[in-house]
Image: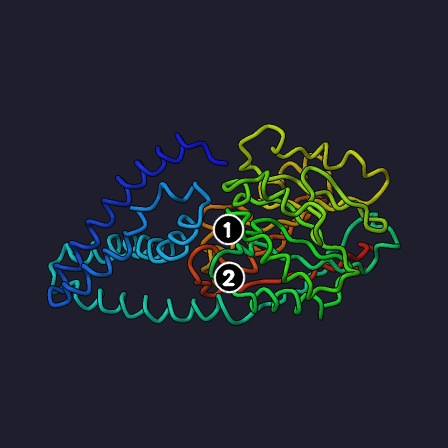
Amino acid sequence: MLDPVRVVLFILIAVVVLGMFNALAIWTLLRVHPRRKGAIITAAIIGNLMWLFFPLLMTLTPLGRLTRAVFGPPWFAWTCFAILYSVIIGAFSLGGARFARWPSRVFLSLTIIGSLAGFYEAIVPLRVERVPIYLNNLPAAAEGTRIALLADLHVGLFTRPSRLRQFFETTRALRPDIVILAGDLVDDDPYFTPKLLAATRFLDPRTPLLAVLGNHEMYGDPDRAIAALRGSRIQLLVNDGASIGPLWIAGLSDYAAQTPRLRPNLTEALARRGTNFPVLIAHQPRAFDEARRMSLPLTLVAHTHGGQLGIRPLGWSLAGVFLPYHMGWYRRGAAQLYVNTGTGFWLVPFRLGMTGEITVIELRASSRR
């Protein structure tokens, strides 16, 4: 669970910094669109209600779940809007309110259209990425092994069972040999684990289903999350591995862990692999640097969501502004990495240009390339 002192410090800093953007955005909106005062004030109030309930987020109580699910999305959406609007339109408004009026109208229109399109992409379609990975020294018995990679389901209060069913039925139809859930299974609170487990019945019961912890399991109650999955359909790997044929699927714990025993330990994850061919599973792409130091051939991760905003054909995503490995396939020397951009979404049902992804990794020997 998160350190309360750090949470309070984060809230204080966020209130000051985001408060300035809020004030500038509201002031600019009222100045540029004075006839829309009522709508502007209403939107600002709804978008900031979450601040009243921030202390509840770390309680993992029914009230905390409800307030997060109800007030969290408009808070995050308004915060992003306020930052962008205050910077972009604030610059235009330096030339006067009349000068900024049309740029503001265009910005607001694009925001509405983009929000609707992003909402649709988040809750309806599903993208299947088929990725052949060519590996040196791949055992002949592992040739053609198909690994289905799902991640960032963020199962929460408003997660639709029908959407989870779609994820697992689509995965089953792909006929993988192994299914991996690469972290952030639930949205902080392990209370929602039964909803996730109920959906796994739509997967072929003969298919191994493995998972690792993500940062959101660590933000909630990681011990309860681990206990909730113990003995279930999902085999959770916490600095441990599983032998699947000639492969050793090594599962790394997450870097957001607050306790030493849950911090990532790649040596432990590989301790029992013997001569099996290793494939590293982790939640965050930062695991790739450690995998390269250990000369591991393949690492599969998620975490970035592609920023839930991007242009796939151009290989650009919002997450790429902040992270060196943010979407798709990478190779550094003999080591390879694939970053799944998330199957679900976090907090706001919005994925513009970044449709939820299921990745099918097919292992092939380099000699076949």
What count of labels does the image hold?
A: 2
Numbered mark located on residue 187 in the image: 1
* Marks 2 and 1, the one that precedes in the sequence: 2
Q: Residue furthest top?
A: 260
Q: Quadrant of the C terminus?
A: bottom right
Corner quadrant of residue 152: bottom right
Q: Above or below — where is 280 with respect to 342?
A: above
- What residue is disc 2 on? 159
Report whether 246 appears left or right of 97.
right
Secondary structure category for the residue under label 2: loop
Q: Amino acid at mark 2?
A: Thr
Q: Residue at x 61, y 33 (%)?
A: 262
| Residue 66: % across, % down | 41, 54
Q: Above or below — where is 289 with respect to 168?
A: above
Q: CA distance from mark 2 to mark 1?
A: 10 Å
Report whether 61 appears left or right of 18.
right
Using the image as rendered, state which of residue 356 and residue 60 is in the foreground.
60
Using the image as rendered, state which of residue 312 and residue 221 is in the foreground.
221
Q: Amino acid at mark 1?
A: Asp
Report whether 78 appears left or right of 206.
left
Please, which colouring scheme is shown? rainbow
Report whether 35 appears left or right of 53.
left
Q: Above or below — where is 173 with respect to 338?
A: below
